[in-house]
Amino acid sequence: MKVSEFQRLIEDIYGDKDAARGTAGTYMWFAEEVGELSRALRRGDRSGLEGEFADVFAWLSTLASMHQIDLEKVAAAKYADGCPRCSSTPCACAEPTPAHGTAQGS
Ligand SMILES: [Zn+2]
């Protein structure tokens, strides 16, 4: 299944409910699922991880659809030629410094 097919599938399943809920409420569900993904990552539970990745992707797809964003198209447009900053694959950008408040350049 292509990303665009998945996005259309989620639109068919949840589009009406998501439109009625609106962006703010739908974003809160998305954020909640991201939190569940974080917990699954910490636990390292494989079946939980698979489900949480699917849920986060579904909620991201829904939010994109609500704003007429074609996820497959915009992701390819931004990343098909490598890193959007340095245009290399793999990315050749300097890693951001981990220390707070000392980031150089951008
Ligand atoms: Zn880069």
Image: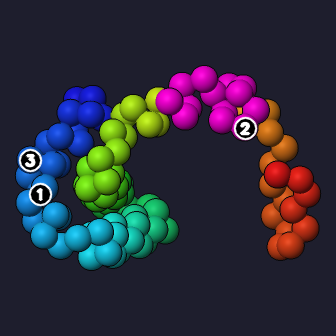
Asked which secondary structure carries label 2, the reply is loop
Please determine whether, in this image, residue 11 is positioned above or below residue 18: above
Residue shown at 29% from the left, 47% from the top = 68
Residue shown at 66% from the left, 33% from the top = 83
Location of residue 89 (image quadrant): top right
Q: Where residue 19 appears, x then y in whole percent?
A: 16, 64
Spatial CA span between label 3 and label 1: 6 Å
Task: Decide whether residue 75 is among the magenta residues.
Answer: no
Residue situated in front as seen by the camera: 64 or 54: 64
Give the residue number, with chain letter if any, for mark 2: 85
Residue type marked 3: Asp
Q: Where residue 52 appears, x then y in whole percent?
A: 32, 59
Horizontal side of residue 22 vs 44, given as left or right: left
The mark that comes first in sequence, 2 or 3, is 3
Mark 2 C-beta to ligand 1 under 8 Å:
yes
- Helix, strand or loop for the magenta stretch, by majority: loop
Please determine whether, in this image, residue 72 is positioned above or below residue 40: above
Horizontal side of residue 93 vs 34, given as left or right: right
Q: Where residue 15 appears, x then y in whole percent?
A: 13, 55
Location of residue 84 (image quadrant): top right
* Bounds of the magenta segment: 77-90
Within 10 Å of disc 3 (Cα), the crowding (few <14, some 14-19, many 20+) is: few
Give the residue number, with chain letter if any, for mark 3: 12
Tell me, for residue 62, which label it has, or none.
none
Residue shown at 63% from the left, 27% from the top = 82
Within 10 Å of disc 2 (Cα), the crowding (few <14, some 14-19, many 20+) is: few
Tell me, for residue 14, which label it has, or none.
1
Tag 3–tag 1 contact (CB < 8 Å): no
Tag 2–tag 3 contact (CB < 8 Å): no
Residue type marked 2: Arg
State whether residue 57 appears in this view: no
